[in-house]
Image: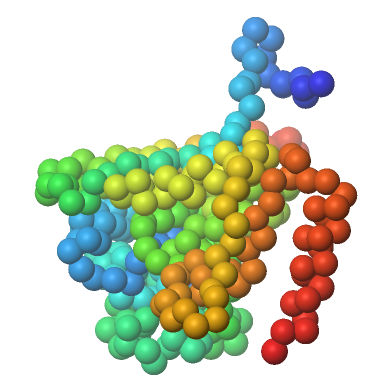
Amino acid sequence: MKKLQQGLPGFPIKPKTLKEKIINNEVKINGNIMTKADIEKTSTDIVNHIIEESNKNSVEKIPLFNSSH
Amino acid sequence: MMHNFSIMNHFLGFGKRDSVTGRQDREHSVAVLGTTRENSHTKAEIELVAAVAGKLAQKDFDIWTGGCPGIAKSANLAAHNVNPKNSWAVHVKRFLNNRTLSVRNLGIYNEKKDKTGSPVLTESGPERTMAIVEECNHAVIATGGLGSAQEFSVCAEAKAFKSSKNDLCIDDLTLLNNNGFYDNLIKTFDTIENDKYKLTEPPYKGLPGFPIKPKTLKEKIINNEVKINGNIMTKADIEKTSTGFAGISHKT
């Protein structure tokens, strides 16, 4: 029997594959034909991804309310 | 008030730099891993990681590498050129003075130091990878040789087996899959998950009198590949195959 998925009612969460669990940003490139413009765009995309993840994780770690007050 | 500044700093990408070690927090540290080779095949990736490292350093992210030529040097140099405080490396002790595996002489990065202030020198590649993982929550892994495969595998294992927030791993892993370099490795994930092994060919064995051909990378690493089909193995197959292992210790 398959394990029940947790999530909001009506929005079942699809189980992640091993690939999805490990690689959360696969960037497919062809180094042989990359132009300067491709490098500029791809590097910006990667940087934006990392900053977005960093912000997401940082906010998750910072308690918004201090329960002692 | 300080708390609000803390949130704002995180959004602006400033992080929390340790005043003693000089290092950013893990959330603002990025490992850049990949080939040591600098040739036409790796040119685009080297330029790409330099662009990534430079832009991240401008946002005050620290860049961490193994202090090697190629991808690592390119990333360290780009970060160093923005601000030397953003460029870091961890060494494998035996590679330290090997110019093909270390660019320590260039002075383009800070070295991770222990509590006594001495540089952290690891004993092996996997140990170095974990020393970098301790510092970073993000990684960009480019293509490369066995070292890069090791770095990817160490990061993958740490992430796959993470069971609590205290288990350190790279939570955010960007894989530069150049020309499908990592496709087969990714396919292996499916094989692992689906538990479908379809290996049918017998292992290669040389015959007396035949010249020994140069070993492939696979042959150099795996000296006893036992191909089985678990779906149709009988008790007799298990008995015969397991007996084969017992003979290994008698080889000279």
Q: Which of B212 and B117 is in front in this view?
A: B212
Q: Position of residue B150 (x, y in %)?
A: 51, 64
B195 lies above or below B51: above
Name the quadrant containing residue B196.
top right
Q: Nearer the viewer, residue B235 or B40?
A: B235
Q: How many marks?
A: 0
A2 lies above or below B147: above
Q: Can residue B39 be seen in this view?
A: yes
Q: Where does the C terminus of chain B fall, quadrant-wise?
A: bottom right
What residue do we see at 80% from left, 53% from top?
B237
Q: In this view, does B221 lie to the left or right of A9?
A: left
Name the quadrant containing residue B157.
bottom right
Q: Where is residue B186 in the image (x, y as percent from the top left)?
A: 49, 45
Q: In this view, does A7 lie to the left or right of B73?
A: right
B227 lies above or below A2: below
Q: Which of B168 and B21 is in front in this view?
A: B168
Q: In this view, does B98 lie to the left or right of A7?
A: left
Q: Can residue B12 be seen in this view?
A: no
What residue do we see at 77% from left, 84% from top?
B250
Q: Which of B240 and A36 is in front in this view?
A: B240
In this view, the residue farthest toward the left is: A36
B231 lies above or below B117: above
Q: Position of residue B151 (x, y in %)?
A: 50, 63
Q: Position of residue B60 (x, y in %)?
A: 35, 57
